[in-house]
Image: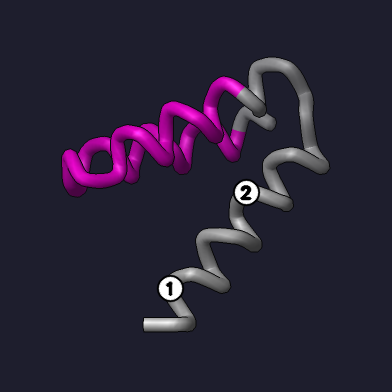
Amino acid sequence: MRKIRDRCAYLEEIDEKYLPFANKIKDLAQGFQEKAIVTLIEKYLNFEGAK
């Protein structure tokens, strides 16, 4: 989970548009909610793939 939080910090640094996504993932990582993290990322990937 630490690596996930680290990657979220990186996303926050590269562009402000990632703040809401990174914050949500960090919150889930803090609570060790692995399945919720995977679900959120899959939804995001499916949404991006639809564009």
Of the two numbered discs 2 and 1 on the same chain, state the one appearing first in sequence. Answer: 2
Q: Residue at x 48, y 81 (%)?
A: 49
Q: Residue at x 34, y 41 (%)?
A: 10
Instruction: Give the alpha-carbon distance from disc 2 to disc 1, as whole Å.
Output: 12 Å
Instruction: Tell me, for residue 9, which label it has, or none.
Output: none
Left or right of 25 on screen, residue 20: left
Q: Residue at x 65, y 62 (%)?
A: 42
| Quadrant of the rendered image containing residue 51 | bottom left
**Secondary structure of residue under mark 1:** helix
Residue at label 1? 48
**Residue 13 pos. (x, y %):** 22, 38
- The magenta segment is 3-27
Prevalent SS, magenta region: helix
Q: Amino acid at mark 2?
A: Leu
| Quadrant of the rendered image containing residue 17 | top left
Q: Quadrant of the N terminus?
A: top right
**Residue 19 pos. (x, y %):** 30, 35
Left or right of 23 on screen, residue 12: left
Residue at label 2? 40
Q: Residue at x 56, y 73 (%)?
A: 46
With respect to residue 36, does 5 lie above or below?
A: above
> Dot 1: within a 10 Å radius of its alpha carbon, few (fewer than 14), some, or many (20 or more) residues?
few
> Is residue 15 within the magenta segment?
yes
**Residue 35 pos. (x, y %):** 82, 42
Q: Amino acid at mark 1?
A: Glu
Contact, CB < 8 Å: mark 2 with mark 1? no
**Secondary structure of residue under mark 2:** helix
> Is residue 23 within the magenta segment?
yes
